[in-house]
Each structure stands twice: as C-alpha cells, then as structure tokens.
Image (cartoon, rainbow, N blue to C red):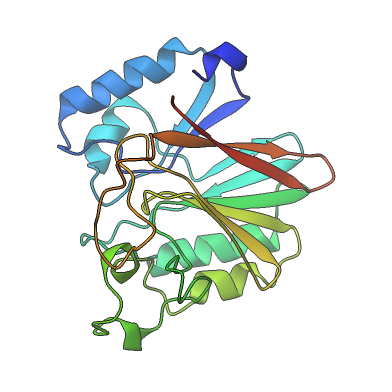
Amino acid sequence: RIGQNGWPDLFLLTGDLSQDESEASYRMLFDLMQSTGTSWYWLPGNHDDTTLMEQLHPIHQSVTLGQWQWLLLDSQSGSPHGELNTKQQQWLQQQLEEPQASWQAIALHHQPLLVGSDRQGKTHQTSMDDDEGIGGIDSIPLRDQGWLWQTLSQYPQVRGVICGHVHQAHTICHQGLTLYTSPATSIQFTSDINEFQLDSELNPGYRQLYLTADGRIESHVCRLS
C-alpha cells in the first residue's frame, strides 16, 4: 500500500514489532523493510526483545534528515508501562541543548500524554498508578510524572512527538507541542480505553508525516481497506 504512492524518505517503526518476540518474527520484518530499499529505523516497545532486534539491525538514538533531527527514545521498563532512565534523560537534555538540525521531533513507544477522552492531554502522575478509574492503555503510559513533556515544551525547536502503544490514532496538543499517536498495524482498540476492547470496525493503519523546512509537521492516518 505505501509503495503504491512512492516510498517515503524513511520508515520509523515505533515498537511492539513482535508479539511473540521470536527471532523468526524479527527476521521476517527485517527482510520486509530491507526489500523497500528505503532507510528505516526501529525502536522497542514493551513486547519487544532488544537483543534480537540489535542482532539484525541497529537501534539508533538520533537520525538527521535535512532540516530535521529525530530523537529516538527507548521507553522499555521491563513492565508493560514505559520509563526513561537517567542516562536517557541526560542524553536527551544534551541533544536539546545542542541540536544537530534546525528542528527536532521525538519518537518513543509509550504515550507521554494520556489519551482517554476524560483525561486527554494530561501527563502521568504517581497518584494515578493506583487509580481504579484509569484502566486500559492509559494505565500503562510513560510513567515519568510529566518530565518528558515538561522538558520538551521548553525548547521551541521541538515540533512534535510520535508514539505507538495505544492502538489508536490521536492528535493531541498540549503546552504548544503536539503528540501524534499511530494506529496499530494489527488490532485496534476502541475509544473507551478504560478497557482493552477491540474495535472490529477499524482496519490496521499507519501514520504519514510531512516535515517541512520551516518547521511544520503535516500528518494524516492511512488505513488499509
């Protein structure tokens, strides 16, 4: 489907690339991406084995393309929710202070903002961890007490954040910065994210991003028919 419209400048795979974490599954994905002849990058989700990934293809932290620098974060924590360790936080802070391009965008697996309709745009707080009113995918976000979003929003060259994990497509603006979540290339969850309920009416999909030289991000979601 993507190739019918011409290949993009790069593919960015935002995690949960293998449900069974088998070598065969990563090999199949590797062979598929290599066959495109296009640059591609991946980062791990909570269902991924980073050792198997790195045996096939490196996990990069930074990618520069034209006027844009992508900062790729590993939010794996060993649990379903996401975390950023101190080393990554320090590295990110350095990249923000010394950008390698005019504009920056960030990618990670776990959502740094909650996506449920009654709390959309809020950042994680420790008090939420035992809140029985927060279930489904919002119970396992990036658990950082809002550190990532608060940090990124201080740097005007940062123009957007993308993530996977939620199995839904959202565009959420908060504090002058926009989060783009990508639909899954497999199953989709319903909008009532307090339950892990499948949405049988939505097909698998992906998100296209157009990054302009003047710092704008144009994006839309494509679904398979």
Number of marks in the image? Answer: 0
Q: Which part of the image, by quadrant, shows the C terminus?
A: top left
Percent from the top left, x then y, of residue 30? 34, 21
- Work out whether residue 35 or residue 167 is closer to the camera in this orientation and state it: 167
Displayed quadrant of residue 172: bottom right
Displayed quadrant of residue 4: top right
Residue positioned 54% across, 23% down in the render: 39
Q: In this view, does 203 lie above or below 214?
A: above
- 177 displayed left or right of 118: right
Q: In this view, does 133 lie above or below 23?
A: below
- 138 displayed left or right of 47: right
Residue positioned 27% across, 65% down in the render: 136
Percent from the top left, x then y, of residue 3? 54, 14
Percent from the top left, x then y, of residue 20? 14, 37
Q: In this view, does 150 lie above or below 13?
A: below
- 70 displayed left or right of 201: right
Instruction: Name the outermost residue toward the front.
Output: 201
Residue positioned 25% across, 27% down in the render: 26
